[in-house]
Every structure is written in structure tokens, then in C-alpha cells.
Image: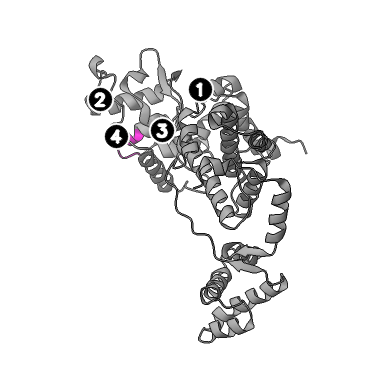
Amino acid sequence: MADSSVILHSPEKTESNQVISKAVNRYTVSQLIRYFGADLPKASNYPRHAKAFVEDCLKKRFPIDGISFARFTTDLPSNRVSPIRKFLLFYQTIGCPTVVADPKTTKIPPAANELVLTFIREAKSLRGDRSKETYTKALNAFFLYVDEQTALGLPASLSGLTVSDFVQHLKDNQYSAFTINLYLSAIKQLAAWCIRRREDLKLSDEQLNALRDIDDVRGLAIERTFYKDSLETNERQQVLGDVETTRDKAVLVLLGMEGLRTVEVTRLKLGDLDFERQQLQVLGKGKSTKKAIKFFAACRQVLQTHLEETNRWPIPQGRRGEYLFDDLKTHQIRYIVDKQLRKHGLKRAGMSAHSLRHTVGQLLLEEGVSLEHVQQHLRHETLETTQFYTKKKTRKTYFQQMPD
């Protein structure tokens, strides 16, 4: 990866335009094959065969033409010749551009770049290892792109122009709008941090302007909606019933009745279960403080049974710091949920462990609980997030409620 002095360099616009204009008729193998396959079905094997042909031409230093085509396809079956013939026609149609080998890149270990490492370490907004890993991945992806562009002789830096090109690169590679906006947010925060540290980094006015331009790069519009499905009342009863062990039953009711996230279930300690006051103390995702929510009677009963079976009832005063589920991981919770869903024929697209949390919010609203109380129970930062459940309920009842 380039060091910070290269990353922060911002070439003159005139130079950029000259380089770009020279590179219009120049593609890497992957870029060319991506354009070739853009209008083909996703399952098509045409791009794979075409890429093998192009790479063979580059290896032998042959031009990509009819003679190379004839040499390469001499002993190939017809089902492999046809894709290459189609590619050659495509290549000739776009004007036989120059093709270069894909730049060799090495996988960057987490926070390998000193700039990223320092930023991640000092970023106060990043709470929890998961957030730091996500931002590190996003920033490493950007700087890999910078290295690839530099290897092709194109100008690339931590600047508005390069970031805008990077966003387009992600779109071309069919990244989701959510992922693109996440990557862009990470880059913008890094740029803002660099501006604040401009004296330590010894940035020039030109570099500062390039960093400020990044804030003007716009992300992709996303229609905010649900990514997860939810269960109906009778479906939830099926999932929470007929469970093999008291531990699995306890896990399921915490997800499907209390609305906890999987990671929140793994963090529960015996001292967080307040049976007397009927409250659960929950340490939320990326949080450092706990919030109290209603500890429902049906859930209390299931957890008490589990505690009795594990010889921890009544909860010993000296063991209140122990975890409720010793050494339970989130992937194990997902397995427990998926097993129950499949058992009752409820496993479908969009239905997962997190769907049980959506189910809690949805059913509470349908039972007449106020939006504000649902927000407090699910511990949403904003009411807007909770309002998605209202939108989902509206869509669900639209055809039944609209007058004829």
C-alpha cells in the first residue's frame, strides 16, 4: 500500500485530464471482461472462456485478433469456441483497445496502513471491535483501489475525484447501495480526521482542498425498508414451542419475546435478570451502558426453569457476575433459530435469528402498544427506526382496510 504522502497527494486537474484521456482506450483484463459480461446472464460461462483467451494472448504477446483466435481454439470443443468468438466480435466492435494484465495486489492485513491504523485507534465514534473491523475493511478496500489505479498509471489519491471514481467502481462491481454508503462514510470520516490533524500530517493547502472535496461526494439513495421478515403470532408460538433443551428454549424466548439481538443474548449475566422488579438489564450493540426493559412473565418462567436445571436458582449472590449462557456464540444462536424455523417449515428468504427481534416489534404494535414504548423496549436510538414497523403493518393491512 502506498504511504500517507502518496495517498494524500492530489495531482493537478490538467494532468488528470491528460492521463484519463490517454487511458480511455486502455483496459485491464478484468475491466474488459466485466464490460463483455455486463449484458450476459449471471450464470453464463462466456466471460470465463473469454478471459482465458485474453490472458493467453498477453502471455504469448500475441495481439487479440483472428489469428490468435484460430490458434487458441484449434483443439477446443465448439461450446468453448462460441464464447470466444462472441468476445472477439465485442472486442472489435469497441475498437480493439489496449489490454494490460491485471495489477498484482497483495491482501492488506487489518489496518496495515499507518494512516488507517492511527485513525481507527483515535476514532471516538467507533465503538466495539466489529465497527473498527468494518471501517478497516472499507478503508483498506479504498487504498487497494488507489494502488491499482496507480499501477495502471492513473492518478489516485485521498481526494474527491478518486473517491468519486471509487464509488463508481463499487457500483460497477454490483456492491449494494448500503455497502457503498458505508464505505463512503468511512472515507469521509478519515478525510475529516486528516483535516483536523493537518498540522501533525503537515498537509499542504492543495492536499487540504482535495480532502475537503471528499465531503461533496454523494452516496446512493436507499429506500429505507426492512431487510428481515417477521413471524405471525401463531408462527412464533410454533418456533418457541417443542424445543429440545431448556437452554435453547431460554435463548429463543429472549430473542422472540424480549426482542434481544443475538450478541445481547451472549452478553447477559445472571445479575442482569431482575425477577423481583421484572426487569432485564441489556448491554446493547456497541454500547458501554445497560438499559432496563420489561422482563415478561412467560420469559421469566422459561429462564427460571433453565436456572433450576443448571443449579443456579435462586441466583447465588456470589455468582451474579457469571454469564447466563457460558461460552455461547452468536453463530450457535443462529443455528438454534434456523433449526427451529426449518423444523416448522418457516425458514425462508429474509427469515433469520434477527427476524425474531422484528417479530417482537411487529406484534407489540399489533397488540396496541404505543410506538414510543416499542421504541424504548427495542432500544432504538430514533423513533424513525421503530416507525418502520408501522410502515410494515400498513402494507400488511392495506388491502383489507381500504374501502371498496
| Residue farthest bottom in this picture | 74
* Of the two numbered discs 3 and 1 in the rendering, the one whose residue sits closer to the viewer: 3
Q: Which residue is mark 1?
A: 377
**Residue 174 coordinates in the image, percent (x, y):** 60, 53
**Residue 363 coordinates in the image, percent (x, y):** 54, 30
- In magenta, the rendered stretch is 243-249
**Which of disc 4 and disc 3 is earlier in sequence?**
3
> Label 2 sits on what residue type?
Glu
**Which of disc 4 and disc 2 is earlier in sequence?**
2
Q: Is residue 249 above or below residue 106?
A: above
Is residue 303 toward the left or the right of residue 38 in the image? left
Quadrant of the image containing the C terminus: top right
> Label 1 sits on what residue type?
His
| Residue farthest right in this picture | 404
**Residue 55 coordinates in the image, percent (x, y):** 53, 71
Q: Residue at x 48, y 55 (%)?
A: 105
CA gap between label 2 and label 4 equals 19 Å
Residue toward you, 251 or 182: 182
**Which of disc 1 and disc 3 is earlier in sequence?**
3
Decide: marks 4, 1 in contact (CB < 8 A)? no
> Label 3 sits on what residue type?
Val
Q: Is residue 303 above or below residue 214?
A: above
* Of the two numbered discs 1 and 2 in the rendering, the one whose residue sits closer to the viewer: 1
**Residue 364 coordinates in the image, percent (x, y):** 54, 27
* Of the two numbered discs 4 and 1 in the rendering, the one whose residue sits closer to the viewer: 4
Q: Which residue is mark 2?
A: 308
Decide: marks 1, 2 in contact (CB < 8 A)? no
Residue 232 on the magenta span: no
Q: Is residue 236 visible?
A: no
Q: Residue at x 58, y 27 (%)?
A: 196
CA gap between label 1 and label 2 equals 27 Å
